Image (tube, rainbow, N blue to C red):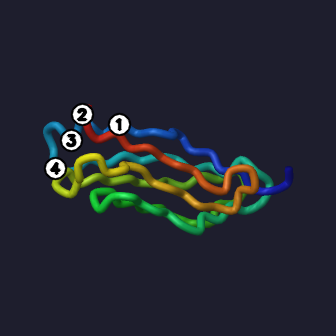
Amino acid sequence: ANGPRIQLSANEIDLSAVLQTKAKARQDLTITNTGHAPLHISKLQVFSRSISADIKSTTIVPGASVRLRVTVTKKDIRRNSQMRLLLICNDPEEPMVVLNIKTES
């Protein structure tokens, strides 16, 4: 109960409309620590070459938020590839958070 708690502003992002007309699409999400101890994000793992993720800080103090920027490059998208991002952190309730990324309608 006194540990860190991760909260994402969304569990899924849809970039399919932007990728219809542009070569790249990006979306910012907010990661908030709603717990009572510092949240440490130890890994951001992507499952496709087309996805890149940039985070301002991997340590989030209680009550604070950081921006996570997700960018998808259209030319690197492989058919049927898993378009998702995995966040690994020290939240005892939710040590792994999956962010699904939709790239086609």
Residue 45 vs 25, above or below: the answer is: below
Q: Which mark is residue 14?
A: 1
Q: Is residue 8 left or right of residue 104?
A: right
Q: CA distance from mark 4 to mark 3?
A: 6 Å
Q: Which is nearer the N-term, disc 4 or disc 1?
A: 1
Instruction: Report the front residue among 95 and 36.
Output: 95
Residue identified by numbered label 4: 23
Residue identified by numbered label 2: 17
Query: In what element is the residue under mark 2?
Result: helix
Residue found 62% across the figure and 49% down from its top? 32
Residue contact between numbered discs 2 and 1, judged by CB atoms under 8 Å: yes
- The amino acid marked with disc number 4 is Ala
Query: In what element is the residue under mark 4?
Result: loop
Q: CA distance from mark 2 to mark 1?
A: 8 Å
Q: Position of residue 82 (x, y in %)?
A: 37, 50
Instruction: Report the front residue among 72 and 46.
Output: 46
Q: Which is nearer the N-term, disc 2 or disc 4?
A: 2
The image quadrant of residue 62 is bottom right
Residue contact between numbered discs 2 and 3, judged by CB atoms under 8 Å: yes
- The amino acid marked with disc number 1 is Asp
Residue contact between numbered discs 4 and 3, judged by CB atoms under 8 Å: no
Residue found 49% across the figure and 53% down from its top? 67
Q: CA distance from mark 2 to mark 3?
A: 6 Å
Q: Position of residue 76 (x, y in %)?
A: 21, 57
Residue found 78% across the figure and 60% down from its top? 37
- The amino acid marked with disc number 3 is Leu
Residue identified by numbered label 3: 19
Q: Position of residue 65 (x, y in %)?
A: 59, 52
